[in-house]
Image (tube, helix red, strand yellow):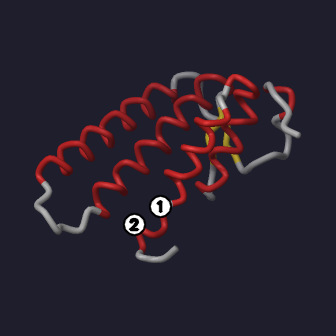
Amino acid sequence: MRQGGAASMTGKSPRKKVDALYWQGRLRAAQAYLDAAQQAHLLAEEGQNCNPVISQMVLSAIAFGDSLTAKRAQVVNQQDHAQAPRLLRDVLGNLLPDGQERRYRRILSFKDEVQYGTR
């Protein structure tokens, strides 16, 4: 059973403390990664390896997640990006719709495959 709210944040997932305005930089980075992915997708030719496009999408999702947790609780995920959805759940509690958490996990599950060729 999941717990909600900031009170349940102790020892749940690897995190680091950030300053109060850190979220703004991560939000800008998230949008930049998303813009780059969209532009690369538009320029991609049929049959082209689209791993770089997907990689940009994954990085965008990570940065959007960091922005949310940084703004709400002044923490971001550290080390294992697969744990980012857990931190988002810890910070947002029941405000995070289950479907959004599932989609976030799915997007992040592509990271190793598209960036390193392994899964």
The residue at the point 45 percent across, 34 percent down is: 26
Residue shown at 19% from the left, 50% from the top: 40
In this picture, is 61 found above or below 82?
above
Would you call the spot at circle 1 few (<14 residues within 10 Å), some (14-19), or many (20 or more)? many
| Residue 107 higher or lower than 88, as above or below | below
Q: Which residue is mark 2?
A: 114
| Callout 2–callout 1 Cβ contact below 8 Å | yes
Which disc is residue 12 wearing?
A: none
- The quadrant holding residue 104 is top right
Q: Amino acid at mark 2?
A: Val
Residue drawn at x 63%, y 51% is: 78
Mark 1, residue position:
111
Residue farthest to the bottom, as pictured: 118
Q: Is residue 97 above or below residue 12?
A: above
Q: Residue at x 23, y 68 (%)?
A: 49
Q: Amino acid at mark 1?
A: Lys
Residue 16 lies, in percent from the top left, at 67, 43
Spot occupied by residue 93 in the image (x, y as percentages of width and height): 75, 28
Q: Secondary structure at mark 1?
A: helix
In depth, the one of 114 and 69 nearer the eye is 114
Q: Relative to residue 95, is residue 111 drawn left or right?
A: left
* Side of 95 relative to 43 (left or right): right
Q: Quadrant of residue 81?
A: bottom right
* Residues packed near mark 2 inside 10 Å, few (<14), some (14 to 19) or many (20 plus): some
Residue 109 image point, x, y percent = 54, 59
Give the secondary structure at mark 2.
helix
